[in-house]
Amino acid sequence: MLNEERIRLMTKMVCYEEGEGKEYIPVKQYYRRDYVGVEMLKTFITSTIAFGILCLCWILYEMENIADILGGRDLVDFGISVLIKYAVFAAVYQIIAFLVYNRRYTRATASVRKYYYTLRKVQKLQEKEERTQPSEGWK
């Protein structure tokens, strides 16, 4: 006989796996420190690429004045100022990445915990159903 509550819970679990679970279940395969660290590394790489693109855009925009900008300054001072701007840019990105991915991991933990609670509930219902059914032996 079909247990309606178990079917309802299993349907709820499948909906979760197809929706939120696609994002949250893979996150829980890592420890918090590993997940946040990998995502911050990805963010560092993309922020470096973004800074390079921004520098390239600035150079293209200031193409006519680039000789004046570089000619009036010492190249070492110019390089140091670019490195300082890059360090600030990367640090801000890393702080934001840490906050975002730490929060995402916390949400995934709470969400997957509910999913596992529902899974245990389904298992208990199934075990209860198996105990109450008479065992059908070989006829």
Image (cartoon, rainbow, N blue to C red):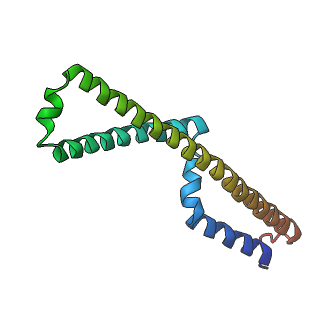
Instruction: Give the position of the N terminus as an image quadrant.
Output: bottom right
Q: Is residue 78 left or right of residue 30?
A: left
| x then y, percent, for residue 124 | 81, 61
| x then y, percent, for residue 43 | 42, 41
Q: Is residue 13 above or below residue 103?
A: below
| x then y, percent, for residue 46 | 36, 43
In terms of depth relative to the viewer, which is nearer, 43 or 24?
Answer: 43
Q: Is residue 94 left or right of residue 131?
A: left
Residue found 34% across the figure and 38% down from its top: 48
- Residue 73 seen in this snapshot: yes
Q: Quadrant of residue 12?
A: bottom right
| x then y, percent, for residue 96 | 51, 43
Q: Is residue 48 left or right of residue 97?
A: left
- Residue 3 seen in this snapshot: no
Instruction: Give the position of the C terminus as an image quadrant.
Output: bottom right
In terms of depth relative to the viewer, which is nearer, 28 or 66?
Answer: 66
Residue found 26% across the figure and 22% down from its top: 77
Q: Is residue 74 left or right of residue 1?
A: left
Residue found 27% across the figure and 40% down from its top: 52
Q: Quadrant of residue 4?
A: bottom right
In terms of depth relative to the viewer, which is nearer, 94 or 132?
Answer: 94
Residue found 77% across the figure and 70% down from its top: 138
In terms of depth relative to the viewer, which is nearer, 131 or 85?
Answer: 85
